Amino acid sequence: MSLDAPDVVEVQVNGVGNQPTGDPSGPDGEVVLDIEVAGAVAPGVKIAVYFASNTDAGFLNAINTAIHDNKNKPSVISISWGSSESNWTQQAMKAMDRAFQDARALGVTICSAAGDRGSSDGVNDGLVHVDFPASSPNILACGGTRLVGSGSTINNETVWNNGPDSSTGGGVSEYFKLPEWQTNAQVPLSANPGAKSGRGVPDVAGNADPVTGYQILVDGQRTVIGGTSAVAPLWAGLIALINQNLGHPIGFMNSILYEDSTRSSLRDITIGNNDSSREADAYDAHAGWDACTGMGSPIGTRLSSLFH
């Protein structure tokens, strides 16, 4: 099967450009994964890739540059980098969330990976944690599944969980309040002491298990990569197609997704958990929204019909 290649544009942020390392298992793989997954879902799409310094300030500058890019005018942004809320300062999260609010006001959808280290998000303190920026209430947070199929038929789809460093993130934010559009989603209280109410992560999901992952070409080598880092561009590509069909951006879509009471546009994942085996409590999948795969994985044609 032949697909039209994407039109990839490099955007340097404050003079920082593309600096491939030559190591497919390093950042090269992450960058190429995003481009190839989004480009496969939306053949021929124009993809602007923003390169910035690997600091909080650099991350923020990259987000602001993309949101306000009057030349490339992205209608949807995919973010595969993130870390536990506990690894960020409140100042940094607040500044980035202000940028995400700007994107929402401008009609730009932002998809963000929910993390790949289970309910602990890689923190060894016996507590549960969620990933930021996925925990921002202005983001479409993307969790992970294990999908087994044949051709165009899905045989089985469960929560992605291959152990502490290879399983979907998800849980309840310790920083952001429960947003209005999650009021009826039955988001549980945090499993941490104090049982706080907060923004539930993720919102949606997609195939993330490296065992059932995505074939990519990086640094001249063919390999298979997974992770929720693949789910964010998967959703971004799908949203780009919807935007194209509509002739305008759908913008912030969470409220519409959560209002889809019959869940006709999403495949509900009800089997599995995000136990990270780090002595932290885990969250179980069940019917409806859960802190493993959110409301489920996309049924593309039905999802498109939600937006007019």
Image: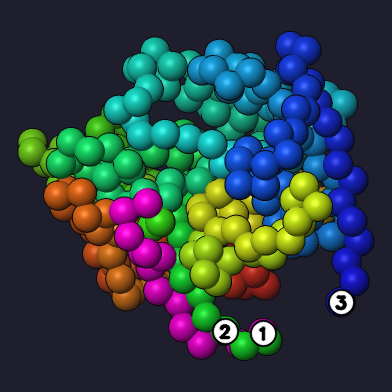
Residue at (51%, 75%) from the top-left corner? Answer: 147
Q: Secondary structure at mark 2?
A: strand
Q: Is residue 20 left or right of residue 209?
A: right
Q: Is residue 1 left or right of residue 160?
A: right
Q: Secondary structure at mark 3?
A: loop
Residue at (75%, 27%) from the top-left corner? Answer: 19
Residue at (32%, 75%) from the top-left corner? Answer: 271
Residue at (74%, 11%) from the top-left corner? Answer: 14
User: Considering depth in this image, is 295 or 217 the residue closer to the camera?
Assistant: 217
C-beta proximity under 8 Å, tags 3 and 1: no
How far separated are the C-alphas under marks 3 and 1? 14 Å
Q: Nearer the viewer, mark 3 or mark 1?
A: 3
Q: Quadrant of the N terminus?
A: bottom right
The amino acid type found where label 3 is placed reads Met
Which mark is on residue 152?
A: 1
The amino acid type found where label 2 is placed reads Gly
The amino acid type found where label 1 is placed reads Ser
Q: Please name the residue that numbered disc 3 is placed on.
A: 1
Q: Which residues are magenta?
A: 152-165
**Residue 160 included in the magenta stretch of the image:** yes
Point out residue 301 in the picture as x, y percentages from the top left corner.
67, 72
Q: Please name the residue that numbered disc 2 is placed on.
A: 149
